[in-house]
Amino acid sequence: MNDENGNFIYKARPSLQAGTKIGIVSPGSWDDSPNYGFLDALRAFWEKKGFDVCIHPQNYYKDGVLAGSDAARAKAFMDMVKNPEIGAIMFARGCTGSIHILDMLDYDAIKANPKPIIGSSDTTTLLHAITKKSGVVTFYGPMGCHFADPANDQRTCDDLITAINAGNEEYEMTYPEVSCLREGKAEGWLVGGHMNRMQLLMGTPYDCLPQRSLVDGVVLFIETVDTTRLEIDNILSQFRLAGKLQTVRGLIVGEMLGVQDGETSLARKGERTYGRDVQGIIAKAMKEISPRVPVVWNFPCGHGSYLSTMPIGSHVSLATSKQDGTRLSFRPVPKSAPIMCYL
């Protein structure tokens, strides 16, 4: 995983291999949609694309809110990693519990069997751990819950296929409707996800957001759902105090859905308002990063109907302007290039 100088060695982006199966596991909560709708939606999506689907029996386990015990969920995931017939692994849903299995996984086996691993929301912790410990690029993208939702935007499907078929080829994505808060260009290693789950990884061996500058720094994307303005401000303040914002070369702010106002995390009716909206909170955080750092707002990387797949650990160029919108270019780099030297 590291060279003789301690630098992390770049692992090529895994791509979907023709003729292989898609493996489905639930690393956190079980599918509580009617008649296992998340699982059925995933099967239908991939079969329409011409792939066979392998739904691990663990998806149907129940241990409280979780899809089986920690050991069962970890084993199911590793079963899919080690199975040579499985060409990609996709999660049925997030919700909670993914962090419980991080120290139960075989990261050497994941490194030896690189394949697209796709999830979002609560599985942010799992994606970060895999990229940090094995060097395999992971994909922050849709899960079964997205495809079971009739409001799912077709671009979610299109972007997923583009990202996992790219392999080592460079590709570019454009987002003309994304708002630009600060114009500019940036390059760096793409890191991000559900900011509440990223916060849980601080101080652990699985934290993917560095504290000190890298060769190129990072392009950070963040999103959250069902929280309060106070909590968003607190998390960004912790990022700042932990030195995480010093490495940011570009900031991508995703959708912040279901964010309540209120003095406490309960946001009870009648409480005092926090006094600063989400854009104001982001503006406060922007003061902690260089004025040359471009910032975009309301990017489709959250819990909305359109979720554009983001390859965590890839090298990315960000360009944004009020006139031309936002463009992301994902580029391969030589395997000998160092990535995330803080590891």
Image: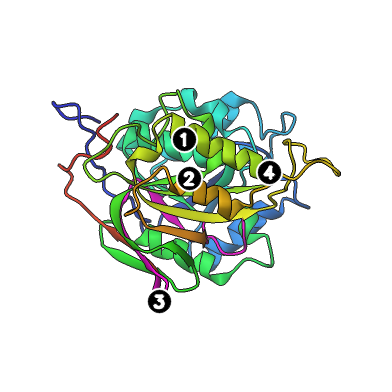
Circle 2 Cα neighbour tier, 10 Å, few/some/many (<14 / 14–19 / ≥20): some
Q: CA distance from mark 3 to mark 4?
A: 32 Å
Q: Residue at (47%, 68%) from the top-left corner?
A: 158
Quadrant including the N terminus? top left
- The first of marks 2 and 1 along the sequence is 1
> Marks 2 and 3: CB-CB under 8 Å?
no
Q: Is residue 212 above or below residue 19?
A: above
Query: Circle 3 sits in a helix, a strand or a loop, which is it?
Result: loop
Drawn side of residue 339 relative to residue 68, left or right: left
- The first of marks 3 and 4 along the sequence is 4
The x and y percentages for residue 266 are 77, 37
Q: Is residue 302 magenta?
A: yes
> Marks 3 and 4: CB-CB under 8 Å?
no
Q: Closer to us: mark 2 or mark 1?
A: 2
> Marks 2 and 1: CB-CB under 8 Å?
yes
Residue beneath disc 1 = 239
The x and y percentages for residue 76 are 54, 34
Labelled disc at residue 228: 4
Check disc 2 and give the amino acid type.
Ala
Residue beneath disc 2 = 285
Q: CA distance from mark 4 to mark 2?
A: 16 Å
Query: Circle 4 sits in a helix, a strand or a loop, which is it?
Result: loop
Query: Circle 1 sits in a helix, a strand or a loop, which is it?
Result: helix
